[in-house]
């Protein structure tokens, strides 16, 4: 089938596109190739896709309404995966307007495109950051998520609300995926695996926030990509058990779903750093700092809904995933 995949030159986008292309789907990918981080990495990811005859790339911005309207009118995709977003919790403190432009206006453009093109399933990236100030672990999609602690998190929560509205008003099946701390080959330079690995190899000090007393549900990229495609293949439906007297945040009377995709095994930050050190054969010089604004102390995914509905759960052990990450990093940087 023909699919539209936004953010195709991104970390997750490239891996999802590869799965779809290898199985024979026709993928129309769009990306604005912005300079949030080095665009050469994005071009290198695209080079992994352009040799597929069933791949078409369009350079454009989802926040440009006319671009998206024209794209839907021309390509008429059957299903849509939205992985385009302004990412990063910390950057949202410095440049909030780009999050409003891309994550809200751009998301709205895609919903309108789906609505007017009779798209049969809209799958989009949400984030574990929506759990915000919640401290009850593990995080469940049935928990209330009304207390975000960064604009990035608020924009992702807003995406879920916007998607639900289109399910209610127009019957558009939508599924949001709350990704938990993704890592692996072709990762982003602003994320901790890249920051730690590059600093250790170059003999620079790494910053360890909250004095290392943090936990993250590190999830390997292959698990994230496979879970995304499996969810795409199962259209969101309404829940027959939904009660308007006691509304469940994780389901709806509308064709709407949200799922956590996480390794459901939280790892101490210091354990994560030690795993990278062991894979590199070098020890890091560490600079211990307090918790940053917008950060949360711990993330931990409850994936029971994903396991029950989709028959899938991430399983890549951290040691295995880090070994693959380090091997790729060394190859990429020669």
Image (cartoon, grey):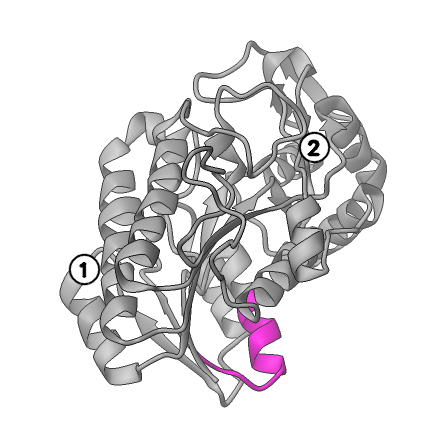
User: Would residue 15 be visible to someone looking at this image?
Assistant: no
The answer to whether residue 57 is above or below residue 232 is below
Q: In terms of image quadrants, where is residue 19?
A: bottom right
Q: Secondary structure at mark 1?
A: loop
Circle 1 or circle 2, nearest the eye = 1
Residue under label 1 = 64
Q: Is residue 23 located in the magenta-colored stretch of the structure?
A: yes
The answer to whether residue 126 is above or below residue 271 is below
Residue under label 2 = 200
Indicate the position of residue 115 as horizontal and vertical percent values. 26, 67
User: Would residue 219 be visible to someone looking at this image?
Assistant: yes
Residue 255 relative to residue 184: left or right: left
Residue 325 relative to residue 14: left or right: right
As drawn, the label of residue 5 is: none
Q: Residue at x 80, y 29 (%)?
A: 274
Sequence-first disc among 1 and 2 = 1
Q: Residue at x 66, y 37 (%)?
A: 301
Q: Magenta segment, which residues?
A: 16-27
Indicate the position of residue 35 as horizontal and vertical percent values. 34, 49
Q: In terms of image quadrants, where is residue 64?
A: bottom left
Q: Residue at x 27, y 66 (%)?
A: 60
Q: Residue at x 63, y 59 (%)?
A: 227
Q: Secondary structure at mark 2?
A: helix
Q: Nearer the viewer, residue 321 or 233?
A: 233
Q: Is residue 247 located in the magenta-colored stretch of the structure?
A: no
């Amino acid at each position: 089938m023909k699919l539209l995949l936004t953010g195709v030159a991104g970390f997750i986008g490239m891996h999802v596109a590869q799965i779809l292309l290898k199985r024979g789907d026709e993928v129309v990918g769009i990306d604005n190739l912005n300079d949030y981080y080095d665009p050469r990495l994005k071009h290198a990811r695209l080079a992994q896709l352009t040799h597929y005859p069933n791949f078409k790339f369009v350079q454009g911005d989802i926040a440009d309404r006319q671009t998206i309207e024209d794209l839907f009118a021309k390509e008429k995709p059957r299903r849509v995966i939205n992985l385009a977003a302004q990412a990063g919790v910390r950057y949202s403190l410095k440049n909030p307007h780009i999050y409003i432009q891309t994550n809200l206006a751009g998301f709205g453009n895609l919903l309108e495109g789906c609505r007017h093109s009779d798209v049969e399933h809209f799958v989009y990236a949400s984030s574990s950051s929506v759990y915000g100030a919640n401290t009850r672990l593990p995080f469940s999609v049935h928990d209330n998520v009304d207390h975000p602690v960064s604009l990035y998190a608020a924009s992702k929560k807003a995406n879920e609300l916007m998607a639900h509205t289109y399910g209610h008003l127009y019957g558009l099946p939508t599924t949001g995926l709350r990704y938990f701390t993704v890592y692996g080959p072709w990762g982003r330079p602003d994320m901790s695996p890249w920051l730690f690995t590059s600093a250790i190899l170059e003999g620079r000090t790494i910053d360890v926030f909250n004095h290392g007393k943090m936990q993250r549900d590190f999830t390997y990229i292959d698990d994230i990509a496979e879970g995304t495609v499996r969810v795409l293949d199962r259209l969101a439906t309404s829940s027959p058990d939904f009660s308007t007297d006691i509304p469940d945040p994780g389901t709806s009377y509308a064709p709407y779903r949200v799922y956590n995709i996480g390794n459901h095994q939280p790892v101490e930050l210091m354990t994560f750093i030690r795993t990278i050190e062991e894979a590199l054969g070098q020890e890091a010089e560490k600079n211990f700092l307090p918790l940053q604004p917008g950060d949360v102390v711990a993330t931990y995914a409850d994936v029971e809904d994903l396991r029950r509905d989709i028959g899938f759960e991430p399983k890549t052990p951290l040691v295995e995933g880090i070994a693959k990450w380090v091997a790729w990093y060394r190859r990429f940087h020669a």
